[in-house]
Image: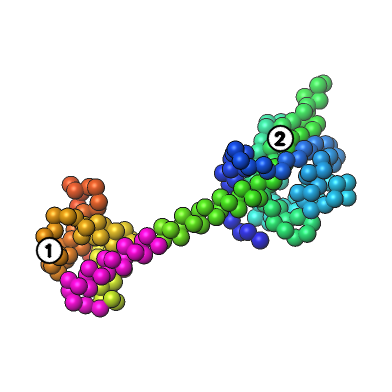
Amino acid sequence: MNGSRPTEQALEAALAPGHHAPVGRYRLDVASGRWSWSDEVFVMHGFSPGEIVPTTELILSHKHPDDRDRVDHVLRAAAATGRPFSSVHRIVDAHGASRTLAVTGQARRDPTSGAVTELYGYFIDVTEASREDAQREATASIRAAAEHRASIEQAKGAIMVAFGITDDEAFDRLRTASNQLNVPVRELATWLVDWLSDPSWAEAPRAEDITDFLAAPVPPGTADVVVRPKPASDAVG
């Protein structure tokens, strides 16, 4: 079961051109808690059309445990206020499969009392769009991690050559500077690689040059900004 909470981006992705997310209609009688579903909503919940009588209790029993209270609150607030609403949440269908649904709705009121008598609107199955969105995020994270790792490896290589030290010793120098500056290792490594790639270098930087840079690095694109170490008492251990 997917443990990450769905977001409104899933709904936006599902409604974007090129996507054809399943859509079904519903009505909720507020007094009785009975729902009327179109065939599509039955299918979204893993049932054959007309197989069960949908109720609020049944609806909530199929919500993902981490989303159940939030959905219950949305429905109660809509029934109490009559304001339009929308929510993106996960369910576990009748077959145990996890789906991500969006629900939108509005209210009908009693013409005499003004009390909310019915909520109605649409369920949209955004499972596929949500999965694609998560895949894009995962791919971006993997790509960013690979880029950071490449910078760290390049920075270590330069330090190893300049100081004539081992891989582990080079990383220790990076990590020590990172702690003193309170700058993540991956970011410091990226700065160092950018500095080393400056075409003005006539020869490879010396150990003293790298030592000076690690003591007060200059972030790329900010030539007038130097990051200096914090006092020893503030350094991150």
Residue extending furthest toward the front: 18
Q: Is residue 16 above or below residue 95?
A: above
Q: Which residues are magenta?
A: 146-166
Main secondary structure type of the part rendered in magenta? helix
What type is the residue that disc 2 sits on? Gly
Question: Which residue appears at 31% of the width and 62% of the height?
Answer: 151
Label whose residue precedes the other's in the sequence (2 or 1): 2
> Residue 203: which disc?
1
Question: Which residue appears at 81% of the width and 25% of the height?
Answer: 110
Judge whether residue 176 can be spotted in this image.
no
Give the structural element (helix, strand or loop) at label 2: strand
Mark 1 closeness class: few <14, some 14–19, many ≥20 residues within 10 Å? few
Q: Position of residue 37 (x, y in %)?
A: 82, 41
The residues tagged by marks 2 and 1 sit, at their Cα atoms, a distance apart of: 68 Å
Is 30 left or right of 153, judged from the image as shown?
right
Give the residue pinned by disc 2. Answer: 105
